[in-house]
Amino acid sequence: MTQLHSTLQAVTDRIIERSQTTRAHYLAVMQRNRQNGGRRSMACGNLAHAVAASPDFDKRLQIKVETRNIGIVTAYNDMLSAHQPFETYPQLIKQTVRALGASAQVAGGVPAMCDGVTQGQPGMELSLFSRDVIAMAAAVALSHNVFDAAIFLGVCDKIVPGLVIAAATFGHLPAVFLPAGPMVSGISNDEKAKVRQQYAAGQVGRDELLASEMRSYHAAGTCTFYGTANTNQMLMEFMGLQLPGSSFINPNTLLRDALTKAGAAQAVKLAHSGLTTADILDAKAFVNGMVGLNATGGSTNLLLHLVAMARAAGVIITLEDFADLSKITPLLARVYPNGAADVNHFHAAGGLQLMIRELLQAGLLHDDVQTIVGQGLHHYTQEAFLNDSLELVWREGTTTSHDLNVVRPFNEPFQATGGLQRLQGNIGEAVIKVSAVKPERHIIQAPARVFADQEEVKVAFDAGELDRDVVCVVRFQGAQANGMPELHGLTPILGLVQERGYQVALVTDGRMSGASGKVPAAIHVSPEALDRGMIACIQDGDIIRLDATAGTLEVLGVDLSTRTPATLPHSNHHSGIGRELFGVFRSTVSPASQGASVLFTEN
């Protein structure tokens, strides 16, 4: 057995120690749910309601205590490309489990919004909060207490984290996550980014921009860049909640359907086995997820989501844990925006199976974990394929990379660390993703220009006011202020300033995620401006030093605590497009460093 890296073991041990009280409480609740839950404890009238609409064959199974009934929680809608394929999944699942003497019911649906659609729009201010709504909606679906296992259908940004929170909350049940896979590749990501920058510079019009976007986002499946959606899929394998090799198989293929059927069959098997989600989602599973995030250069949104997901299972993780694991985890993948390749290319080059093998052999993953397919993460070095009889089988994945520009072995990494760096200083605590940032830009020192939203940045850019060395401070973008929207509209603008030869960086209490690109961005500043954070005390002209090497973020030569904090300049983010319904979320949400959640603020 490979010896674990000492830092990996130390981080795991301190998480376990830190989580003793919360984890013990969680496990006690799960044990109580196991004893009191399910159809076996229901009155006849309750059970009759639950099966009233079922076909006779299913109804006969559902009323028998010895059979298994699987609850399906789906995020299907046909506006979201990644979730449109889920339309056919329930029937496929039901047909599969019937053949095994079990039944399945759609327990309920959860909302699934697309950040790509709401980017730069008012609806984006509901995006982060939708994660907790999804968790609550899934809880409502499963609260009927008639299921022996759950299947979760979700892929994208806030949907999978919300469903994982629900799966952990109902951790007395086994859970299987079934993805839909990425769309087939369109135009290159570099070409898409170039047209976006040309549009920002006024060199092409809206018709050219739209044509480019349509060639990029053009089919069913997840977007093919390595943003939050595909980072979610990586995590589901690293954490043992999805079938091995299932993340990046394209929709509407024979292999995709075979994996869906296999996942349904696995849910039935787990329902008979007694293995539950609470057995899988422990401290080691979350450490494995953090290592996967660092090794793949995944979305910084998961710095929020993993904290919230872990808290649902009674596990307390911090930014310090992420940073310490980043220091020992080499970057083994370059997928856009960290490279030119997309996730289809990454999967073909060796993908997650090669990476998990390399990290296990290096002692950087816990192998002694429970997964939905058995004991040991080594199961996830196997890839799925169809044999000559079109039967689904697994075989060991490649032991060598098929493209060293995309995925590399442990001893030949793209960089020695994972690229997620914690920043601390008199501005507060933040994080920066440097895996896509050139080393010469890891340290930026320049005068501040302060903005209250990204629209103000665009106005200043159009006026030529950013053509200089500058640190753009965009505040009042935290969860308490306006729901912490993505600020992707800044990426092409700041990228152009950088290409013109200036030193440029972003400091914000908002989010940028996996599409933050090549501009240094200190994000998730905590405390946020509306929570008396020092980012509210920065003034135009202050010299800011962002040092991703040393892990510092400071205003030089100023005692910020002596200044009067700026106040929220307007409140139009609190109404319109449904925002008025989320006032209770804004007023109770926890800081970004604690997951920006309304569900676990007591920890």
Image: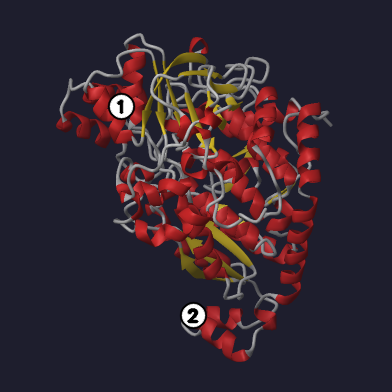
- Regarding residue 236, the answer to whether it shows in the image is no
Q: Which residue is mark 2?
A: 54
Q: Amino acid at mark 2?
A: Ser
Secondary structure category for the residue under label 1: helix
Quarter that holds the N terminus: top right
Check disc 2 and report its element: helix, strand or loop. loop
Q: Position of residue 535 (x, y in %)?
A: 48, 32
For disc 1, the marked residue is 192
- How many numbered circles are shown? 2
Percent across and percent down for residue 449 are 37, 23
Q: Residues within 10 Å of mark 2 (few under 14, many from 20)?
A: some
- Give me the C-alpha separation between circle 2 and circle 1: 48 Å
Q: Earlier in the sequence, mark 2 or mark 1?
A: 2
Q: Amino acid at mark 1?
A: Lys
356 versus 372 height, above or below: above
- Is residue 278 toward the left or the right of residue 452 in the image? right
Which residue lies at the image location 53% right of the left edge and 32% below the top edge?
298
Compared with residue 129, is residue 343 higher up or lower down, i.e. above or below?
above
Q: Residue at x 41, y 49 (%)?
A: 127
